[in-house]
Amino acid sequence: MPKPSTTKPPAVDYFKVPRRLWRIMKKHLPPEPPPKPQGGRKRIGNRAVLNGIWYILWTGCQWKAVHRTWFGASSSVLHERFQTWQEQGVWDAVFRALVKFYRRERRIQWRWQAVDSRSCAAPLGGEKTGKNPTDRAKLGAKIHLLVDQRGAPLAIEITGANQHDKWSVASLVLHIAVRRPGGEQHFLADKGYDYADVHQTVEQAGYRKHIKHRRRRGEPQTDECPVPGETQFPAKRWVVERTFAWLVKRRSIRTRWCKKASNWLAFVQFACASILCDLAVFG
């Protein structure tokens, strides 16, 4: 695929999935059935349905707020197809396909990998939600990401907002979308991950860890950080924060309106696939 002349993605068209992303995604969508010999209404095409889901991903509107004339499909068709694809594993396959596409176009920067999480409000509650301790115990959910040195998402997990970040580390490391190569790899995390079991998990996975030190009760405060990675290397953990900033531009991610955790995970996977496509094409 020829590289574009600019390094900045074009303005987002909320009504249409980008052509490059569509070319990859359509290979993983179920084939459209042939017309019925006895006639009848033609089945809505996958491209029109995907455009409608793309609109909801960015705007965060209700399914029933989408007018039939916008995409040639009713809101019930969009919602039904979205959930069917989720049950068939389409969104997970799309995310993995985009990770491989990014690897082929730009090469994954395995040397420095970072993890972090972000809490999102979940006013309607549902599966995998909990009382957010940082938001007056309101219901919320968390997105956990593991990214490479450029900030490309390689592993995703969602939990309730009341679950500690440290419990997601093993799952993220084990469920990276592609196989990790050998060689020296650094693991970056903030002080919320400074626990003995996290250190053990990271070391067993073969990483060189750089987890910001969390001062314990009664421990004297020192000016110098005891973690070598925090003083000998330039800041590299910010890329995961930037990836979260990209994610929450999509209103369906910023606020979780899905009661089903699997549906919200599908939206997150769709958003991460879009980010990977932009990183692969524009760098």
Image (spheres, rainbow, N blue to C red):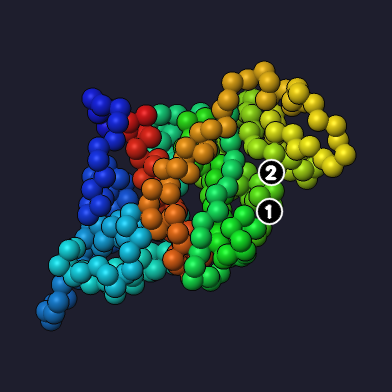
Q: What's the residue at 59%, 43% (across, down)?
A: 116
Please tell me which residue lies in front, 230 or 47: 230
Looking at the picture, tell me which residue is in the foreground, 10 or 137: 137
Q: Position of residue 190 (x, y in %)?
A: 65, 37
Disc 1 and disc 2: Cα gap in Å?
8 Å
Q: Residue at x 27, y 70 (%)?
A: 65
Report crowding for label 1: few under 14, some 14 to 19, many 20 or more residues within 10 A (C-alpha): few
Please identify the residue farthest to the top as the structure is shown.
232
Q: Is residue 31 above or below residue 239?
A: below
Q: Quadrant of the N terminus?
A: top left
Relative horizontal placement of residue 211, taking residue 100 as reference (left or right): right
Q: How many numbered marks, from 0 up?
A: 2
Whether 265 is drawn above or below 4: the answer is below
Residue at the disc numbered 2: 192
Q: Earlier in the sequence, mark 1 or mark 2?
A: 1
Q: From the top left corner, tell me how far across and down residue 234 is, in percent.
A: 59, 21
Q: Is residue 283 left or right of residue 47?
A: right
Q: Secondary structure at mark 1?
A: loop
In this rendering, position of residue 246 left or right of residue 129: left
Residue 99 horizontal/vertical position (percent)? 44, 41
In the rendered structure, which amino acid carries the disc numbered 2? Gly
Q: Quick one: SS at disc 2?
A: helix
- Residue 46 in view here: no
Mark 1 sits on what residue? 164
How many neighbours does mark 2 have within 10 angstroms: few (below 14), some (14-19), or many (20 or more)?
Answer: some
Q: Are marks 1 and 2 in contact (CB under 8 Å)?
A: yes
Q: Between residue 23 and residue 18, name the one nearer to us.
A: 18
**Name of the residue lying farthest toward the right:** 218
The amino acid sitting under disc 1 is His
